[in-house]
Amino acid sequence: MTGQGGSETPESQRESAINRASEELGLPAYYRSLIRPLLRNPEGHWPRCCGGGCEPCAQTLCRVAARALELLGTPRKAPLPD
């Protein structure tokens, strides 16, 4: 994902990807900061859904993070939690 003329910094590219992925998947803006740690460790352990009805669900956060990585051109290689 590149900005106009490729002038976006890596940090602004990450923020753009997080915002776009969040909008596509319906994650409210006030939860978007929860995506940044997942992008910093894209192949590490990501949270799993506990089945307790948490808001936001870890599954949603993982889907948004995975989509953001796709938008950045660096899709997650490790399996996503169920």
Image: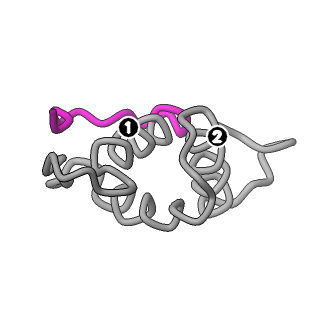
Q: Secondary structure at mark 2?
A: helix
Q: Which amino acid type is marked by label 2?
A: Glu
Q: Secondary structure at mark 1?
A: helix
- Quadrant of the image for the C terminus? top left
Q: Residues within 10 Å of mark 1 (few under 14, many from 20)?
A: some
* Along the line of sight, the residue nearer the viewer: 66 or 49: 49
Q: Residues within 10 Å of mark 2 (few under 14, many from 20)?
A: few
Query: Horizontal and vertical percent for residue 64?
Result: 45, 42
Query: Horizontal and vertical percent for residue 58?
Result: 28, 51
> Is 21 left or right of 4, judged from the image as shown?
left
Tell me the distance, in whole angstroms, between the alpha carbons under discs 1 and 2. 12 Å
Q: State the mark number for residue 63.
A: 1
Q: Earlier in the sequence, mark 1 or mark 2?
A: 2
- Quadrant of the image for the N terminus? top right
- Decide: is 60 above or below 67: below
- In percent of the image, x 57 and y 54: which residue is there? 14
- In percent of the image, x 49 and y 33: which residue is there? 73
Q: State the mark number for residue 23.
A: 2
Instruction: Please say whether residue 23 is one of the residues in the magenta stretch.
Output: no
Instruction: Please say whether residue 72 is one of the residues in the magenta stretch.
Output: yes
The span shown in magenta is 70-82
| Total numbered labels | 2
Q: State the mark number for residue 19.
A: none
For the residues bearing labels 1 and 2, Cβ distance under 8 angstroms? no
Q: Which amino acid type is marked by label 1?
A: Arg
- Decide: is 70 above or below 56: above
Query: Horizontal and vertical percent for residue 6?
Result: 77, 45
